[in-house]
Image: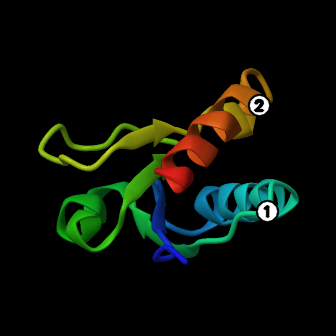
Amino acid sequence: MSRQKTILFACGTGVATSTAVNAAVTEAMKKRGLSFHAQQAKATEVPGLADSVDFIVATTPISASVTKPVIKGLAFLTGIGKDKVLDEIEAELRK
C-alpha cells in the first residue's frame, strides 16, 4: 500500500474557509475510496509548511516561492467548477 498523502488546506485565516473545504474534500474523496492526512493553515504560513505536505488546496493566493502543487479551491466557495477541482485533487492523491 502506498504512503498516505498530506494535503495542506489554506485560507486567509486558517480557520473558517479551510475547515469547510477540508470537510468537503474529505467527504468527496471518501466517496471515491481515497483518504489523506490534512493540515490547515493561513496562506502566510504555507511557505514554511509546504515541505511537510504533498500538495496544497488554497482559497486565496499562495506565495510564488512555494514549489509544491497548489490547487485553487475557490470552486468550493462559488460552487462553479467544483467537480473539476475534486478531479484534480483525486489525481494528485493517486500519483
SS class, disc 1: loop
The alpha-carbon separation of the residues under discs 2 and 1 comes to 16 Å
Q: Which residue has dot 2 on it? A: 83
* Position of residue 5 measured from the top left corner of the image (x, y, whole percent): 47, 69
Q: Front-most of 42 and 35?
A: 35
Left or right, 49 with respect to 83, comes to: left
Q: Quadrant of residue 35?
A: bottom right
Asked which secondary structure carries label 2, the reply is helix
| Picture residue at 63% right of the left edge, 47% below the top | 90
Using the image as rendered, state which of residue 18 and residue 24 is in the foreground: 24
How many numbered markers are drawn? 2
In the image, taking residue 83 as reference, residue 47 lies left or right, namely left
Say above or below: 8 vs 72. below
x, y percent for residue 17: 64, 56
The kind of residue tagged 2 is Asp
Q: Residues within 10 Å of mark 1 (few under 14, many from 20)?
A: few
Residue identifier under label 1: 33
The quadrant of the image that shows the N terminus is: bottom right
- First in sequence: mark 2 or mark 1? 1
Horizontal placement of 32 versus 50: left or right?
right
Q: Label 2 crowding class (10 Å Cα cut-off): few <14, some 14-19, many 20+?
A: few
Residue 72 is situated, as x and y percent measured from the top left of the image, at 50, 35
